[in-house]
Image (cartoon, helix red, strand yellow):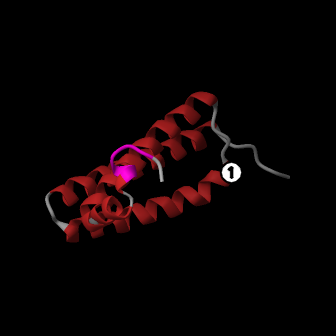
Amino acid sequence: MTSEPQPHDADTLIDLYRAIEHCSRAMLAAALEGDWDAVSREQQQCTALIDQTRQLVPTVTLPKAEQRTRMQIMRQILQNEAVIRRLAHPWTERLERQLFPSVAAGGRV
């Protein structure tokens, strides 16, 4: 006997994605201030939320509207992560510009 996903499960899953996005915003704010200890603390909280999400994902089928919401949230998380990465590792951008100057200028490798 398998249990059907409950409507509140979709809400719970979306709430978890929103909580992860909130953590990623807090990480970004801390990174912009150069407070890497706070970034680390938020990252630990984010990791716990991601673990909860991974447990729930296989049991929930999101309706179309919630799928779109999830994608919007994920895009924001990825944008935040990209900025944090650039702040944490500015030398990687410099190295990329040195190794691939045509790409930095808008060309192709």
Q: Which sits in the foreground, 27 or 84?
A: 84
Q: Residue at x 39, y 59 (%)?
A: 100
Say left or right for 102 vs 54. left
Q: Is residue 104 magenta?
A: yes
Give x and y (percent) for residue 70. Answer: 51, 39
Instruction: Report if residue 19 is visible in the image.
Output: no
| Residue located beneath label 1 in the image | 59
Magenta part of the chain: 102-107
Q: Residue at x 85, y 52 (%)?
A: 1
| Furthest residue toward left | 33
Give x and y (percent) for residue 79. Answer: 37, 47
Give x and y (percent) for residue 45. Answer: 36, 64
Instruction: Report if residue 104 is visible in the image.
Output: yes
Q: How many numbered tags mark residues here?
A: 1
Q: Is residue 74 magenta?
A: no
Question: In which image quadrant can residue 28 be found?
Answer: bottom left
| Furthest residue toward top | 65
Q: Is residue 24 above or below residue 5?
A: below
Query: Which amino acid type corresponds to the residue marked 1 in the rendered image?
Result: Thr
Say left or right for 31 vs 17. left
Q: Residue at x 75, y 43 (%)?
A: 4
Question: In which image quadrant can residue 91 be found?
Answer: bottom left
Q: Which sits in the foreground, 2 or 51?
A: 51
Q: Residue at x 31, y 63 (%)?
A: 98
Give x and y (percent) for residue 52. Answer: 52, 60
How would you rate the neighbour count of disc 1 (Cα within 10 Å): few for under 14, some for 14-19, many for 20 or more? some
Secondary element under disc 1, as helix, strand or loop, is: helix
| Furthest residue toward right | 1
Say left or right for 98 vs 16. left
